[in-house]
Image: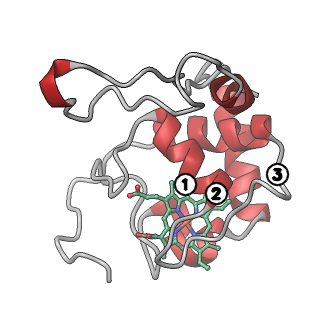
Amino acid sequence: MALLVACGRSDGGGGVRYPDHVAAGGNQPPAGEIKNPLPIDSANAADGSKVFSAMNCDGCHGGGALGWVGPSLVDGRWRYGGTDGALFQSIYYGRPRGMPAYGGILSPSAIWKIVSYIRVQPVPVTVPTESFK
Ligand code: HEC
């Protein structure tokens, strides 16, 4: 839903704002920002965990999202920025190197619950340094 709000804006060509990107001249382009509309609590995280298994996310990202053929989602490192909006977009639209788009089969609220689940996972003591191709 937040995505529709972001795309329906008339002031900025429908863009999405990434506040942690560097803006030329210090001027962020006009755009909407995608934020998790759900509280990150144990109920949403528990629901997200179920969707994560049911959608076979763990088949690629590993049990506990620790990383397998897909990158770890709990090591604190992100290819696509790591904001709530970036996670949502990765799941909703997919990513070019093998991440399927789930926006056609999952509701936005189910995706936000997965984001909540990912957010509450602790960063493991040791994380692999290998970068997945
Ligand atoms: C077929 C294997 C596969 C499945 C299934 C899969 N992923 Fe992915 N995922 C990947 C790969 C590979 C990447 C890296 C894509 C890239 O770098 O372009 C990725 C990237 C991501 C990213 C971005 C990570 C970053 O560092 O920015 C997120 C978030 C993500 N996946 C979440 C999920 C969730 C949630 C599910 C289940 C709904 C899921 N994935 C299912 C393979 C998969």
Q: Position of residue 113 (x, y in %)?
A: 69, 37
Q: Is residue 33 left or right of residue 101?
A: left
**Mark 2 or 3, which is nearer the eye?**
2
- The yes-or-no answer for disc 1 within 8 Å of ligand 1 is yes
Residue at horizontal 61%, vertical 22%?
Answer: 41
Q: Earlier in the sequence, mark 2 or mark 3?
A: 2
Image quadrant where residue 45 sits: top right
Provide the secondary structure element on which disc 2 rests.
helix
User: What residue is shown with label 1?
Assistant: 90
> Which amino acid, by three-letter code, is at mark 2?
Tyr
User: What residue is shown with label 2?
Assistant: 93
- The yes-or-no answer for disc 2 within 8 Å of ligand 1 is no
Query: Does the residue at mark 2 contact the one at mark 1 (Cβ under 8 Å)?
Result: yes
User: What residue is shown with label 3?
Assistant: 106
> Which amino acid, by three-letter code, is at mark 3?
Leu
Q: Earlier in the sequence, mark 3 or mark 1?
A: 1
For the residues marked 2 and 3, what is the alpha-carbon distance in whole angstroms?
A: 11 Å
Query: Does the residue at mark 3 contact the one at mark 1 (Cβ under 8 Å)?
Result: no
Q: Is residue 9 left or right of residue 73?
A: right
- Say which of 129 and 12 sits in front: 12
Q: What is the total number of numbered labels drawn onto the structure image?
A: 3
Residue at horizontal 76%, vertical 65%?
Answer: 55
Q: Is residue 115 above or below residue 20?
A: below
- The yes-or-no answer for disc 3 within 8 Å of ligand 1 is yes
